[in-house]
Image (tube, rainbow, N blue to C red):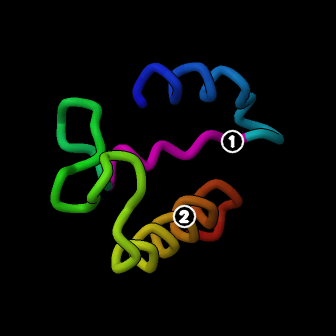
Amino acid sequence: IDNLNAELKKLADGKTVFYLDANTVFDDGAGNLAADKTADGTHLYAKYYAEWGRWIMEQTASLVGEG
């Protein structure tokens, strides 16, 4: 996932297109989704969606100067 994210990050210009790196929240330290947060290594357990949503709102607010 780190390789894919690195390529996606290249699309962001920091002005009109932004990249939010959720690895800071859910990464196991080795570039994988933490095992306690997933059953398949790809998708979060539903109970983490609210945390992810809050994190996205916080990051977005800081990018637009509201955080």
Secondary structure beneath label 1: loop
The numbered dot on residue 59 is: none
- Residue found 71% across the figure and 35% down from its top: 14
Where residue 52 appears, as percent x and y from the top left, is: 45, 67
Judged left or right of residue 37, residue 49 is right
Provide the residue designation for mark 1. Answer: 18
Secondary structure beneath label 2: helix
- Residue found 48% across the figure and 75% down from its top: 54
Judged left or right of residue 37, residue 7 is right
Q: Tell how many labels.
A: 2
**Chain part drawn in magenta:** 18-25
Query: Relative to 15, is 55 above or below?
Result: below
Query: Relative to 32, is 10 above or below?
Result: above
In the rendered image, residue 24 lying in the magenta stretch gets the answer yes
Query: Relative to 65, is 54 above or below?
Result: below
Q: Amino acid at mark 1?
A: Phe
Judge the density around disc 1: few (<14), some (14-19), many (≥20) Cα neighbours within 10 Å. some
Where residue 16 appears, as percent x and y from the top left, is: 83, 41
Give me the C-alpha separation between circle 1 and circle 2.
12 Å
Provide the residue designation for mark 2. Answer: 56
Q: Amino acid at mark 2?
A: Ile
Of 28 and 56, the residue lying toward us: 28
- Quadrant location, the C terminus: bottom right
From this viewpoint, which residue is outermost toward the right? 16
Q: Counting residues from the N terminus, which is met first, the one under dot 1 or under dot 2? A: 1
Where residue 3 appears, as percent x and y from the top left, is: 45, 20
Where residue 4 appears, as percent x and y from the top left, is: 52, 25
Of 32 and 6, the residue lying toward us: 32
In the rendered image, residue 39 lying in the magenta stretch gets the answer no
| Magenta stretch prevailing secondary structure | loop
